[in-house]
Amino acid sequence: MTRTIVESKTKTAVIGFDEPFCVIGERINPTGRKILAEELERGDFSRVEADALAQVAAGANILDINSGAVFSNKMAEDPRYADNNFVEPPLMKEMVERVQAITDVPLCIDSSVPGALENGLAAAEGRPLLNSVTGEEERLELVLPLVKKYNVPVVAISNDDTGISEDPDVRFAVAKKIVERAADFGIPAHDIVVDPLVMPIGAMGTAGLQVFTLVRRLREELGVNTTCGASNISFGLPNRHGINNAFLPMAMTAGMTSAIMNPVALPVGPTKIAEKRAEVEAAGIILPEGMDDETFVTLFGMGSTKPRAGKEMEAIRAANFLTDNDPSGNEWIKFNRVPAKPGEGRARTGRRRRA
């Protein structure tokens, strides 16, 4: 069966048909994250490091590192900063080195800039995943030689010079073209992870069915592993987690073997806590004096004041168990084990002693 090997210096992540679903953490990405981009512009990598650790704690198997930052202030001082080919290569190198210094989880090097891809590959220890190549001729000629040179697996996105087609047969044809062109460079199919492109279900009612059909075809006809931007399916809709939680297990049973996603449920901030406390007080509910914020948000089902594994991770782990990719449910039990409170010693297992 197809197995795609991604490695750090000391740890291996396997993407495969008969392997537990592989979660590629997407949080280290300044695109659309103004505060992170501003911090990177100042040379502050503390949020990158915090995001790396939080995603690993939540269960990410691979960490995606995207260097697509826009340095607006430096751009005003030096026109070179308007060019991502100038900004991204040194930034990628620094981000990779910072993340590797605090975790041994394998990496995914993610950029549209070839120089940033090469800098990331050169800095990464082990065998990272490269994100990404498309069916565009220029991109094929730039990226596939890097894949061959560094002997790494690559994400292949199913769009080409004509853009993203709504026709799943066209997207399959683009994926097939990439696999065949990669073979010309001596790159085997097991080192290609195809992203068939998930469309928003709110804009296209058949988007889910399309992806499930495409994933089956990619597995059965091309023998490749697959991935996707998991949250795309719920874009623009209410209760996105509910849709994502249904989509991921369904995609897994169709044959999808990985996803680029956020594994972390973000912490509840002080503003929301203050609003809820005011609401509770207005309702005449009397709370114990001195109740801390963590107890309060837990009591009212708001989540947690600390980063933790998101609901999507719960759905994935349940699906791993149900598809026998979590033998005996060991990971599911571990994931749901309630930690002992200070002073209580070990958590109870619930097992009765024989009389």
Image (cartoon, rainbow, N blue to C red):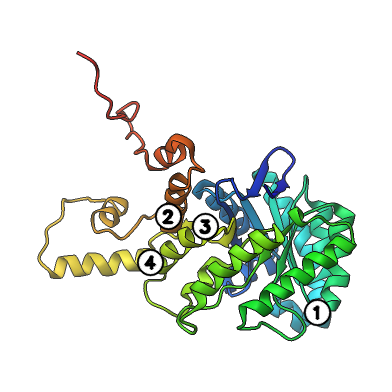
User: In front here: 30 or 313?
Assistant: 313
x then y, percent, for residue 72:
69, 80
Query: Tag on residue 83?
Result: 1
Three-letter code, disc 2:
Ala
Q: Is residue 175 above or below residue 102?
A: below
Q: CA distance from mark 1 to mark 3?
A: 39 Å
Residue identified by numbered label 3: 252
Query: Tag on residue 315?
Result: 2
Taking the spot 60% from the left edge, 83% from the top edge, the residue there is 166
Query: Which image quadrant is residue 175 in?
Result: bottom right
Query: Tag on residue 316?
Result: none
Query: Tag on residue 242?
Result: 4
Q: Which badge, 1 or 3, is on the more N-terminal residue?
A: 1
User: In front here: 350 or 123?
Assistant: 350
Q: Which badge, 4 or 3, is on the more N-terminal residue?
A: 4
Q: Mark 4, residues whose alpha carbon is within 10 Å: few (<14), some, or many (≥20)?
A: few
User: Mark 1 and 3 residues: CB-CB less than 8 Å, in contact?
Assistant: no
Q: CA distance from mark 4 to mark 3?
A: 16 Å
User: Mark 4 and 1 residues: CB-CB less than 8 Å, in contact?
Assistant: no
